[in-house]
Every structure is written in C-alpha cells, then in structure tokens.
Amino acid sequence: MTPDAFIKQLKEAFREEGRVLPTADQPTLEVPVEQWLETARILRDEFGFEQLIDLCGVDYLSYGQDEWETRDATAEGFSRGVDAQGPGRFRWRELPEAEAVENRFAVVVHLLSIQHNRRLRLRTFAPDEDLPMVPSLVEVWSVANWFEREAFDLFGILFEGHPDLRRILTDYGFTGHPFRKDFPLIGNVTVRYDEEKQRVVYEPVEIEPRVLVPRVIRADSRYRTDEIDEAAGEAAGSRSGQSTGQSTGKG
C-alpha cells in the first residue's frame, strides 16, 4: 500500500473520531482523549501496529514564541539578539503563574507496524490543564509502562489505569515537573553529598539563570561570498587577458 493510500484509509476509518495530518516524515493521527484507548486498540488489531516504539509528553506553553532577535536587533553587545524572556528564565521563588493555554499538554505516541513496514504518530491533548489526565495504554502495549511513568515524572501528566504510576527519573522528594515550560531551567534545589552529615543534602540554587546566545551572521563583507567569488573571477580573467596579450606581443 502506498503512503497516500494509507492516509486515505486512516481518514476513512477515523472520519468521525479524529483527523489525519499528512506531516513530512510520517502521518499523524490526532484523536480526542475520549477515543484514545479505543483508537489504540483499532490501530493494533485492525491496522497491524503491533509495536509502540515511543511515548512522550509535550508542553505547548509558549509554543511558537522566540526569544531571539536577529533581523531587527541592534548592534549593542553580544546579547543584542536576546529578549531573555523565554520559558524557564527565572528562579524557583519567582515562579510565574502559567498563562491559560488551550490544549497545553499532549501525549504523543509513535507506532510501528512490522508486518506492513509502516509508521504512525498518534496524538491527543489532555482536556484539563490543571490536572492533565489521559487513559493509560499499558493494556494495549505493555511497553508503554515506563514511557508513561517518564511522561508523568517530567510533565505531570496522569495516566488513568496505569498499574504503577510513580516517578522514574527524579528523586522521591522532587518538587515539580522539570520538562514543563514554567519550570525554572536552573532547577529548584542543589543536591550534594555532605561528608560531615554523611547523607545527601538539599540546598538553594546558587547559579543565575542565563541565556545562551546563538551565533548570528550579520550582513558583513566577510560573509558576502557571492560578491567575493565574482570579484575573484574578474581578477583572474583580467590576469589571464594580460598574460595572453603579452604572449601575443612577443610573438
């Protein structure tokens, strides 16, 4: 089956439940959270997607915003292209209140059909931003267990029906969810081992939030390679003409 035929088949099968987005790398099927679990079963049993290869959370807070100013920036110092207002540029005690964003948290799944040599991206949005919750896919693909624990740990997304939903990467006493866009990039505490107390201690963060400035190539003669090449070509042609004229004169 061709990719176009597969997309057409998806649109016919999920005409009422969701929509198919023909993205560049692979098709994306987006369904409401109420159809999440049933759609997963259909994709496994009727479309042959027997393997879940990845599951992750996405936070769309500040999606599409850019803190870099390159075209309209001034020439004042190396930080001229930085707005410094991007997500995470604050301390934990200065944690701002997140703005209300429709469809802020999403769960994205990547599926593989070995028998059909086909891939599919499946996405849904959690309806409640304050308590994002999505049905667990563990009963459909058991490998989703640790993936969902990771999404819960890093994004705070709850997976209803998960058999053992607890943190998997951060410490037991960790506060917050580090992959959320309203979580400070420097973290909330510093963890170290104290030799005198012979235990791990938690201390306030000492580093300052900073912005890494990307390299910006300006409209500079050093980078105008087309004109440089053209000038070099004219110079080479001029030297060649002079050499030919001298040879002709000697003849």
Image (spheres, helix red, strand yellow):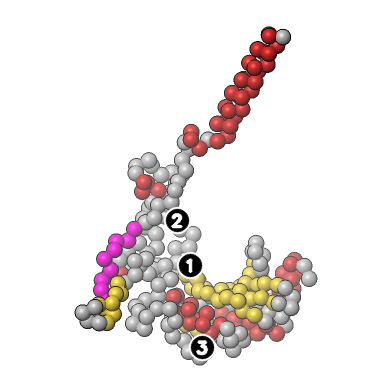
Percent coordinates x, y for residue 50 in the rendering: 67, 82
Residue 60 marker = 1
Span of residues in magenta: 202-210
Task: State which tag comes first along the sequence, 3 or 2.
Answer: 2
Q: Are marks 3 and 2 in contact (CB under 8 Å)?
A: no
- 49 vs 83, nearest the viewer: 49
- 146 vs 108, nearest the viewer: 146
Query: Is label 3 in a helix, a strand or a loop?
Result: loop
Q: Residue at horizontal 72%, vertical 73%?
A: 117
Query: Is label 2 in a helix, a strand or a loop?
Result: loop
Percent coordinates x, y for residue 181 in the rendering: 42, 67
Residue 66 marker = 2
Between marks 1 and 2, how big is the CA–CA gap? 13 Å
Q: Are marks 3 and 1 in contact (CB under 8 Å)?
A: no
Q: In the rendered structure, which amino acid carries the disc numbered 1?
A: Tyr
Task: State which tag comes first along the sequence, 3 or 1.
Answer: 1
Q: Residue at horizontal 48%, vertical 37%?
A: 219
Percent coordinates x, y for residue 215 in the rendering: 44, 48
